[in-house]
Image (cartoon, grey):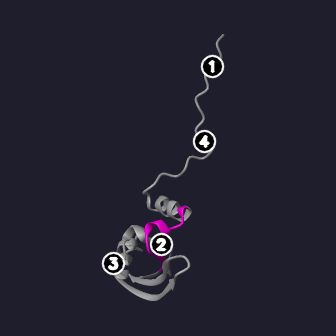
């Protein structure tokens, strides 16, 4: 796989770089997000846990995908909601329990 950085923009207000990259993956399926995090972190010379992938888009019939990502200065700068969503999407965290999803087993009334 080959990574080409198409656009890179510094966003000092949010302490991050906003990146659009193209990943060429001939003869293979669209790479998983875990693989893309590793590839983009190496290409941008940043840490994997500071990188959030926003979008992966592949066109039909083309072995190239467009990736939009944000590289933060530190893990503390990542918004908590965005970090939680990203970790759930990568399978690193369990989804929050839905209210009322786990109901205690009801006991039969004594006769």
Determine which of the numbered discs, if any, sits on residue 11 in the image. none
Q: Secondary structure at mark 4?
A: loop
Instruction: Please say whether residue 26 is visible from this viewpoint.
Output: no
> How far apart in space, not on screen, are marks 2 and 1 (Cα)?
50 Å
Query: Which residue corresponds to mark 2?
Result: 53
Q: Quadrant of residue 82?
A: bottom right
Using the image as rendered, state which of residue 18 and residue 27 is in the foreground.
18
Distance Cα–Cα, label 3 vs label 4: 41 Å
- Residue 16: x and y in percent read 49, 78
In space, the residues marked 2 and 3 are separated at their CA atoms by 14 Å
Nearest to the eye among marks 1 and 3: give it.
Answer: 3
In front here: 79 or 40?
79
Is residue 100 toward the left or the right of residue 33 in the image? right
Badge 3 element: helix
N-terminal of the pair, mark 4 or mark 1, is: 4
Q: Whole-percent x and y of residue 97?
A: 56, 46
Residue under numbered circle 1: 108
Question: In which quarter of the view is residue 90 placed?
Answer: bottom left
The residue nearer to you, when weighing 106 against 61, is 106
CB atoms of marks 1 and 3 within 8 Å: no
Q: Look at discs 4 and 2 and give the one toward the viewer.
A: 2
Q: Which residues are magenta?
A: 67-80
Q: Is 2 situated above or below 84?
A: below
Mark 4 vs mark 1, CA separation in Å: 20 Å
Query: Looking at the picture, how far across and down is residue 63, in whole percent?
Result: 41, 82
Please say whether residue 23 is one of the residues in the magenta stretch: no
Residue that extends furthest to the top in the rendered view of this protein? 111
> Real-space Cα distance between discs 1 and 3?
59 Å
Residue marked by disc 3: 42
Q: Which mark is residue 101?
A: 4
């Amino acid at each position: 796989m080959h990574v080409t950085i198409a656009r890179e923009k510094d966003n000092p207000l949010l302490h991050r770089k906003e990146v659009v990259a193209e990943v060429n993956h001939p003869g293979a399926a669209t790479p998983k997000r875990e693989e893309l995090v590793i590839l983009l972190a190496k290409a941008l010379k940043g840490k994997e846990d500071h990188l959030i992938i926003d979008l992966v888009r592949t066109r039909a019939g083309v072995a190239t995908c467009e990736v939009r990502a944000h590289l933060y200065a530190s893990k503390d700068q990542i918004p908590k909601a965005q970090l939680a969503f990203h970790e759930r999407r990568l399978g690193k965290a369990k989804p929050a329990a839905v209210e009322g999803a786990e109901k205690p087993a009801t006991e039969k009334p004594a006769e």
